[in-house]
Image (tube, rainbow, N blue to C red):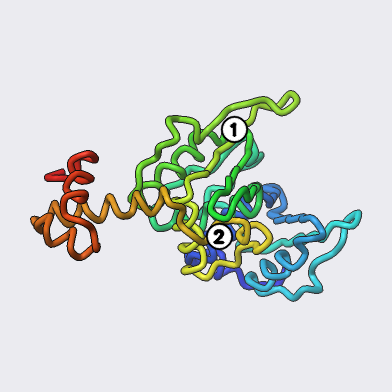
Amino acid sequence: MGKGSWDNLLSGTPEALYWVGFLYADGYINHNDWRLSVRLAPIDQGHLVRFAAFLGYPATRIKFYRGYPSLDLRHSRIPDVVARYDFRPSKTYNPPYLDLEYEEVVPLLAGLIDGDGHVERRTETQAVVTLGMHQAWGSTLRKLRSYLYRLLECEDLSKGEGLRYYKDRDTDMVRMSLADNYVLVLLKRAVKGLDLPALRRKWDRVPDKFSARSEFYILRECIRERLGRGESMTSVARSLGKNYSSFTQYVYNHNLKGS
């Protein structure tokens, strides 16, 4: 058995949840001999070093298997990790049951994205984050997506297209997509705010700036909230530097008065 300390992973902190999400995607736990194994692409060797350090192991514990950095660990606390985070045998086909608080979604999802996700940057304010897994994970990904939108207090406008089932050769898969600029910017800010050890090569592709559409959404919700509190349209229009006539027309066109 190894000498590392596994209390960090069992702590339930944001960083612990990040690594749990990462292990759901890229880790393997043998339930017969309680061995945890992680093998990554060479480009992510540094990430494996960070994970080992989080568990209290030196970088020298990382070995190479056919050119891939690998970490294989046995420890008496691994059964505790399995029980706490519901790591199941053949997790590819048996996702965990996630009993989450809303604020736990961001670190867990960030870990999953860094493990199995892909980020495609399209323009300065547009990107698509996709997470592809076996279709058995469909309800789990749907739950994570729903919790994320509730946490960020925004409406999911994907019209059901945020989750898509498909075949990859003979395997039934599900893909979750996040493409809303408003959601991606807030998600990235949350990841930074929690100081998670996220992979820069992925998160640098996620936009930092709100698009014009997102700014419109933010402005709309701000106006709705202020008018809902009873503030006059004159006061709101003046504070936003808007012409009163065009502002009132905007309010009525978007049904913001008294909503």
> Which residue type does callout 2 highlight?
Tyr
Comparing 48 with 151, the one in front is 151
Q: Is residue 254 above or below residue 48?
A: above
Image quadrant where one finds the N terminus: bottom right
Percent coordinates x, y for residue 30 in the rendering: 70, 49
Which residue is identified by label 1? 174
167 left or right, relative to 13: right
Where does residue 177 sit, x and y in percent of width and height?
55, 40
Is residue 62 shown above or below 30?
Answer: below
Residue sitting at x 51%, y 67%: 192
Q: Quadrant of residue 72?
A: bottom right
Name which of mark 2 and mark 1 comes first in the sequence. 2
Q: Nearer the viewer, residue 100 or 88?
A: 100
Residue for badge 2: 18
* Residue type of the residue flagged with mark 1: Val
Which of the 4 image quarters holds residue 236? bottom left
* Camera-nearest residue between 142 and 8: 142
